Image: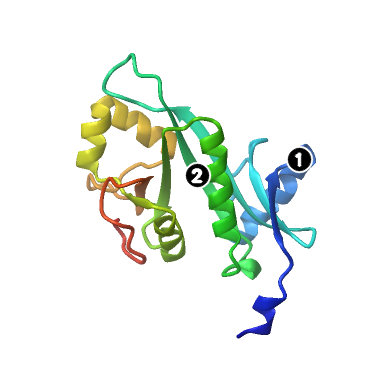
């Protein structure tokens, strides 16, 4: 067994403090290509992963009104945005801790459904979400569950533009629960 893996300090997940926005942006700069972090502006509810006083990961859990076919439905959905790990900490369980903390965040706030939008070539994230019960939410199922207008709103709220309709940006939408086929790492489509 690798000795480095057996002597790692504990990973702590906590909410971002007001003065940490710059540190979170710097993490995004290390975790994503240069233009990937350009649009990252962490909201106050961003969850941070810390190890030995060093910021090593983050996720932005967003809550939104879940679209439905009926206007009288009052349901909440959650989406995990900007899941990131410092390149030096990848493979040490940071992503797992962040996903589990975000799932608790959504559960505590009464979210009925939780979503993730992942770049199709991101095998690590696809496998991570699959291990937490996320499956692909095919376009046909989106339309059945939310209607055309509701699906458009869902795409807007989850930052998923394209995919199954031929204008793929390489990002695919997944939902926690048994709605479709299991994530498959390395696949451009879930």
Label 2 residue SS:
strand
Q: Is residue 36 visible?
A: no
Q: Identify the image quadrant of the C terminus.
A: bottom left
Q: What's the mark number on residue 17?
A: 1
User: Residue at position x 31%, y 27% from top?
Assistant: 150
Residue 72, given in percent of the width and then of the height, sits at 33, 14
**Compared with residue 35, is residue 158 higher up or lower down, i.e. above or below?**
above
For disc 1, the neighbor class at 10 Å (few under 14, some 14 to 19, many from 20) is few
Q: Quadrant of residue 132?
A: bottom left
User: Residue at position x 40%, y 33% from top?
Assistant: 156
Q: Identify the image quadrant of the N terminus.
A: bottom right
Q: What's the mark number on residue 94?
A: none
Left/right placement of residue 140 relative to residue 120 reads left
User: Residue at position x 78%, y 62% from top?
Assistant: 52
Q: Quadrant of residue 3?
A: bottom right
For disc 2, the neighbor class at 10 Å (few under 14, some 14 to 19, many from 20) is many
Looking at marks 2 and 1 on the same chain, the residue that comes earlier in the sequence is marked by: 1
Residue 105, given in percent of the width and then of the height, sits at 57, 39
Please give the residue where the numbered disc 2 appears in the rendered image: 80
Look at the image and name its color scheme: rainbow
**Compared with residue 137, is residue 107 higher up or lower down, i.e. above or below?**
above
């Amino acid at each position: 067994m690798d000795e480095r893996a057996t002597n790692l300090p504990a990973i702590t997940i906590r909410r971002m403090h007001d003065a940490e926005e710059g540190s979170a942006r710097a993490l995004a700069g290390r975790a994503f290509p240069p233009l990937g972090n350009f649009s990252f502006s962490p909201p106050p509810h961003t969850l941070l992963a810390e190890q030995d006083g060093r910021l090593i990961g983050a996720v932005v859990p967003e809550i939104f009104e879940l679209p439905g076919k009926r206007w009288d439905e009052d349901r909440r959905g959650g989406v995990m945005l900007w899941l990131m790990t410092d390149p030096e900490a990848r493979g040490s369980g940071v992503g797992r801790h962040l996903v589990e903390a975000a799932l608790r965040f959504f559960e505590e706030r009464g979210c009925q459904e939780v979503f993730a939008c992942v770049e199709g070539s991101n095998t690590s994230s696809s496998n991570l979400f699959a291990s937490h019960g996320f499956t692909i939410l095919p376009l046909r199922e989106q339309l059945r569950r939310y209607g055309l207008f509701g699906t458009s709103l869902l795409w807007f709220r989850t930052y998923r533009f394209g995919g199954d309709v031929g204008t793929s940006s390489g990002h695919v939408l997944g939902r926690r629960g048994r709605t479709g086929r299991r994530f498959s790492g390395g696949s451009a489509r879930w």
